[in-house]
Structure formats: C-alpha cells, structure tokens
Image (cartoon, helix red, strand yellow):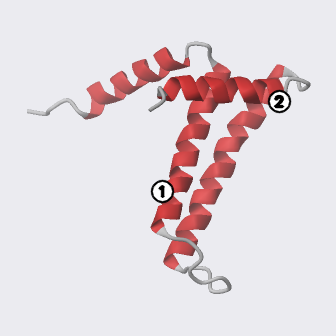
Amino acid sequence: MHDTWDVIERLAARLEHHSSALPAEQRRLLQILKITEEAGEVAEAVFGATGQNPRKGHTHTWQDVEAEVCDVIITAMVTLARLSPEARQTFAAHLEKISARDLTPTI
C-alpha cells in the first residue's frame, strides 16, 4: 500500500509539470475548479444510480458514485498540495480542529 500523501504529492508534481507554461495563479484557479468538475460527476452518477434522468434512466451504480466521491477527495487533496507545500500539516491541523469541535463528548 502506498502512503496517501506521497501519492498525492506525486500527482500534484505531475500536474504542476504538465501545466508549467501557465502562470501560477491560473494553475491554482484551474486546479480549484477541477474540484467542482469532479463534484458534478458525483451528481451525474447519483442521478444515474437513482434513474432520475428520464432520458437516460439507470446509467450508474452506487459503486460508480463511490468512485466519483473518491475522485473528489483525491482532487481536493491534490489541490491542497498544489496550494501549499505544507499540505500534510495543514490538513492534519484542520482535521484535528474539526475533530475537537465535532467529536468532543458533550455533557
């Protein structure tokens, strides 16, 4: 099994190399927009899994939805890695904050 953040950093580096002709700000904006594109694919898969598009019917499975959600997560992690060289630490600190806020037992 690969270390998740190692894979994410390799993907981010590959994308940085691929888009290196673009200005840095444009690369960041396009990567952020990629999250929205992937989220749209989740929505499309949900419509397909539930058969809610009368023209298309059932075109996806719930496993397709799961795969698309994974794509959103990976894309978001790559985005964070492309925005910050400290992505691992940024994510860990944010997760800790969310954990403390939402998983602390209430009395």
- Residue extending furthest right? 21
Q: Earlier in the sequence, mark 1 or mark 2?
A: 2
> What amino acid is found at the position of numbered circle 1 in the picture?
Glu
The disc at residue 18 is 2
From the viewer's side, name the closer residue of 93 and 20.
20
In the image, residue 72 sits, relative to residue 1, either above or below, namely below
- The residue that appears at 66% across and 30% down in the rendered structure is 11
Q: Secondary structure at mark 2?
A: helix
Q: Tell me the element at label 1.
A: helix
Whether residue 44 is situated above or below residue 77 in the rendered picture: below
Left/right placement of residue 90 relative to residue 96 reads: right
Give amino acid for label 2: His
Q: Nearer the viewer, residue 2 or 23?
A: 2
Disc 1 marks which residue? 66
Residue 41 vs residue 33: left or right? left
- Estimate the x, y position of residue 54 in percent, counting from the top left: 62, 86
Residue shown at 66% from the left, 47% from the top: 36
